[in-house]
Every structure is written in C-alpha cells, then in structure tokens.
Amino acid sequence: MNKFKYTFVIFFVMIALFSCSKEKRSLKLLKVSEHSSSKVNDSALRNILNEEAGIILQTENTIDEDFALEQLKEGKVDLVIIPNNITNIESNFRTVIPLLPRFLMILTNQPTDYKNLNELLNDGIVYFEDQSRLDSLFFKNLYYNFNIDERKIRSKSFDEIEFEKESDSLKVYVGLTHLNNPLIKNLTYHGWSLFSLGNVDNYGKGSKVEGFTLMNMSVYPFVIPMHIYKGKPEKSILTIAIKDILIARTDLSNQIVYDIVEALTEHRSRIIQLDNNFNLLDFDYDKHVLSFPIHDGTRHYIDKNKPPLWSKYVKMIWPLISISAVLFGIFASFRNKYKRRKKQNIEMYYNSLLDIRSKSEEAIGVDNLVDILKELKAVRAEAMKSLANKKLDSGESFNIFLALYNDTKTDLIENLKEIRLKIQENIA
C-alpha cells in the first residue's frame, strides 16, 4: 500500500513539473513605424516565440514613438519595436535584440541623369511615405548632410501617388521601408526606376553615403543588388539602412528576455521559412551603435557558458591530456613570446589613438576633423583585423583600446557638431 502511495505522489509531482515547464507567458508588444504599405507581418515572430519559448505576444501598431515609449515606461506594454535612432534618453530602457532593417528607397517615374539628390528632389513632385517623428529626424539629418533645402521640396502623401509612368512631370517616391514592400514592386512594375545615392564602384572609397553614416552611427550603407524586382534594377543601387530594435524595461525578467533572444537566434532559419521578409535578420551586430544598452537577459545569452566538448569525452582523451602536460613545458616559452608580441601590438594601437587625440586638439575646420575621424576608423578596422587574425588578445587590454576609441570618436563628433553650429550661426 505504501509503495502504491509513493508512486501516486511521484506521478502527480512529475505532472506538476511538466505543467510548469509548459506554462505560457503573455506579453504585450507595441510596434512603431508600421505603415500601411511597409508592413511586415509579425506572425512568424509570434509563432516562434510561442512554440520555442512559451511566450504569447499580443501586438498593436502605432506611428507615434513617444506614445510607445510612454506606454513602455508606464508598464502598459512589455516590449516595443522602434527604429534604432531614438533621441529620448531613458535609463530604464534596454535593447533586447535588433530586428529587420528598413531602407531608404527613392524611385522616379522617368529615366534621369541626376547624380545630385538635391536637384532630383527639387525638380519633381515628391511623394513621401508616412513618417513617424524618428523617420522625420532621419530625413532632417539626410537633408543636412546632402545640402538639401527642405522648403523647396514639393511634397505629397504617398496615398496620392499615381503609378502611371507616362507623365510630363517628374515624380519621385521617397520612403524608409522594407525591401519587399509591395508598393516598391508595384512601382518598378510600372516602369519606375530606383535612384542610387552614389556610384556603387566608389563605395568603400569615401563616398557621400559613407560620410553620412560616419556622422550618424545608427545607420549604415547598403547595396541593393540588381534584378531583385523581376529584372529591376538594372544596376546595383547604393542606399542607406536603419534597423528596428526590440526594446524593454530593465525590470522585464532576465529569463524571459533570455528565452526571447534564444528562440529568435537559434530558430532564425525557421522564421525565414515562415516569412522570407526575415532573410535580412542579422544577429551579428555591434552593441555600441544601439540606442540603448543591451538587456541583462540578452547579455546572459551572449555570455552563456556552454560545457566544453572535452568534458563529454574526458575518459577517452585523458591520455592525451597527460601527454599534453608533458609537452606543456616545451611550448611554454613560445607562448610567452607570443603573448609579449601581442602586448607590443596593442600598445602600437594605443599610441595611434593617442596621436589621433593629439591631432584632434589642434584640428580646425570641418574637413580636418572628418579626415581625423576616417583615420580613427581605419585604426579600429586594423585592430579588429588583427583580432580576427589572432594577432591580438580579446582581453582587458583590447577592451581598454575600444573604450579609448569610443571616447575619442565621441569627442571628435562633438567638436565637429560645435564647429558646424558656429558656421551656421555665422551664416545666420
């Protein structure tokens, strides 16, 4: 009888544990910049989070990012998808994970030889995609960097756009939208052409787009390949991209955030199968260009400690471990020399940064500071290349180098903004 009693108790304990592991968690998600013509259905994300993390997402849309941030701050929603160029400094928000990029898409109804974006926008009727405040901020920065007078643009809502190619007047569509936007495909089908922000052959050689992205770290250059829209475009298009990011409050459970990141990262291929819009989902990102620091739950996933492979086969490789202990002494001297060489290499990059900081203190003029910024970027690129080639250790010394790099970059950008502001004041 007692044996049956214990078996009965164990049975119900196991059921209870199983039920807890399958418990569903419900979260509210608010999406910003979700316009009628640029929507990407979030059902794929919902399905993966439901199946793999036991998270049920209740989603709503808005084009008012201030409303979305206020809802998140007050705890009325748990997650927000928002463009990665937020200027609202809120210490209680954290980045969960970057999501899909949107692209600056510019199309014209007539073949043009314009190589200047300013002339193109001033000569035609410009149909703009609906914009949130953050999108408007992006365009203000774009106008400033490309010397465009916004007051001269004859703009209309994209709802008024006419698809017919045949027209005496030049018409231009401008929008920050996803690559598979049906409107873009429809325009190209009706003979509209994509406009490139520069010669793709000059990309990587200091193009105007690279200058813009250098001064606006939340955006990055992107090349739209030829023939992706049934034979259009006929040549590659250079443009600008900005990612949407998933953010949460700091008090959202680390475990929930960990589960979200794990589900989306490890089941990326499954998400793409459900919706091919997500083939641009890229989780290899630079956390230093995000609007908010990453969430602790995300950090835990990134830094998770997986058991080493040898721990599963310790009995099989024990003889090899013993032999390696004998050989250790032989290779110890080589290892020490190797480490000393790496230390000398990182000191070389330290000295380069210090030289650049010294130059920046004596620099005058916008062009001078921009050249120094490019030189700074080149030093970081060379250091990252050395790190990839294992010529440097990714330890504390390298972290100090990155911190010094970021401080130098921030100081240079601030100096550049001050000089440009003074120039504008003198012109006014």
Image (cartoon, helix red, strand yellow):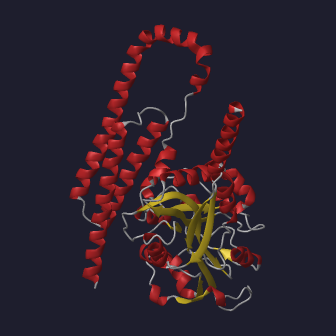
Question: Farthest residue toward the left?
Answer: 362
Q: Is residue 274 above or below residue 313?
A: below
Q: Is residue 367 above or below residue 331?
A: below
Q: Residue at x 36, y 57 (%)?
A: 373
Q: Residue at x 36, y 39 (%)?
A: 398
Q: Say whether residue 177 is visible.
A: no
Q: Is residue 201 above or below residue 88?
A: above
- How far across and how far down the image is residue 221, in percent? 53, 61
Q: Residue at x 41, y 49 (%)?
A: 378
Q: Say whether residue 258 is visible.
A: yes
- How far across and how far down the image is residue 269, in percent? 70, 51
Q: Along the horizontal axis of the image, is 170 left or right of 70? A: right
Q: Is residue 53 above or below residue 217?
A: above
Q: Along the horizontal axis of the image, is 226 left or right of 367? A: right
- Quarter placement of the N terminus: top right
- Quarter placement of the C terminus: bottom left
Q: Residue at x 61, y 24 (%)?
A: 312
- How far across and how far down the image is residue 278, in percent? 67, 60
Name the foreground residue: 147 vs 304: 304
Question: Farthest residue toward the front?
Answer: 1
Residue 260 occupies quadrant:
bottom right
- How far across and how far down the image is residue 308, in percent? 55, 28
